[in-house]
Image: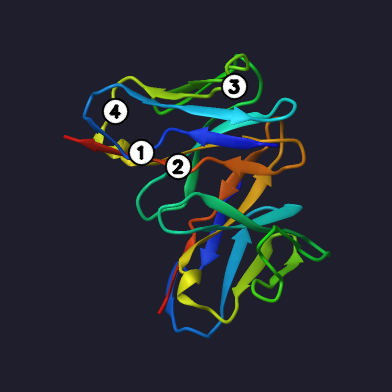
Amino acid sequence: SAVISQKPSRDICQRGTSLTIQCQVDSQVTMMFWYRQQPGQSLTLIATANQGSEATYESGFVIDKFPISRPNLTFSTLTVSNMSPEDSSIYLCSVNSGGAGETQYFGPGTRLLVL
Amino acid sequence: GNSVTQMEGPVTLSEEAFLTINCTYTATGYPSLFWYVQYPGEGLQLLLKATKADDKGSNKGFEATYRKETTSFHLEKGSVQVSDSAVYFCALRQAGNQFYFGTGTSLTVIP
């Protein structure tokens, strides 16, 4: 298994500002994932971040809006840029842990409210 | 393509009632199947998983059996408790590490 921490746990931000979310894992992992969970909805994958390469973004998400860093095998950041109220969500970091039937483990999430 | 369809909620049960949350999937090949639980104010936690047909995953009194013939992975618990109140997500993992999640089913257990 993997233990994942995220900072901040929650924040209230003003429209037009940016917030950087940090994700720390207790072991080295190749791939890290960033999800968005809008109120009352399921998870939507934003991007996959591999160490040493550009993140891969899913349809509907772009690097200018959600830049991602992956400086090493245990850490990643997601920035939500030029925020609007529609960006109010829970942002979740996750990793896969190996073995048969690889399992995805999640951080506790960052609850973001944009006013 | 790959997708997960799960029972719409919300579901409200009395304590000690029997729980079933339906989940069916569409996938190419042989996915692994998972149930995750999200307690109020928390992130997702793995509840149980099954990696091949006829496998049964179990944890904390919850069970789910991987049924290839019906492409289903229904979650069951014989006697729910107030502490089981949460949102439950069914998910599949296909080769390539991509996970696909259902829309979640909210469960409220009343004393």
* Residue B22 in sight here: yes
Whether labels 4 and 2 belong to a single chain: the reply is: yes
Q: Secondary structure at mark 1?
A: loop
Nearer to me, B48 or A64:
A64
Which mark, residue B76? none
Using the image, tell me which numbered label, if any, was put on residue B80.
Answer: 4
Residue at 45% over, 84% down: A14
Give amino acid for label 4: Val
Q: Are marks 3 and 1 in contact (CB under 8 Å)?
A: no
Q: Chain of mark 3?
A: B
Q: Position of residue A49 (x, y in %)?
A: 73, 60
Badge 1 sits on which subunit?
B
Q: Residue at x 65, y 71 (%)?
A: A66
Q: Is residue A114 above or below residue A34?
A: below
Q: Which residue is mark 3?
A: B71
Mark 3: which amino acid? Thr
Q: Is residue A37 left or right of residue A12?
A: right
Q: Is residue B73 above or below residue A112?
A: above
Q: Nearer the viewer, mark 1 or mark 4?
A: 1
Q: Amino acid at mark 1?
A: Gly
Q: Residues within 10 Å of mark 1 (few under 14, many from 20)?
A: some
Q: Residue at x 45, y 22 (%)?
A: B63
Label 3, label 1: how many angstroms apart (C-alpha)?
21 Å
CA separation, marks 1 and 2?
Answer: 8 Å
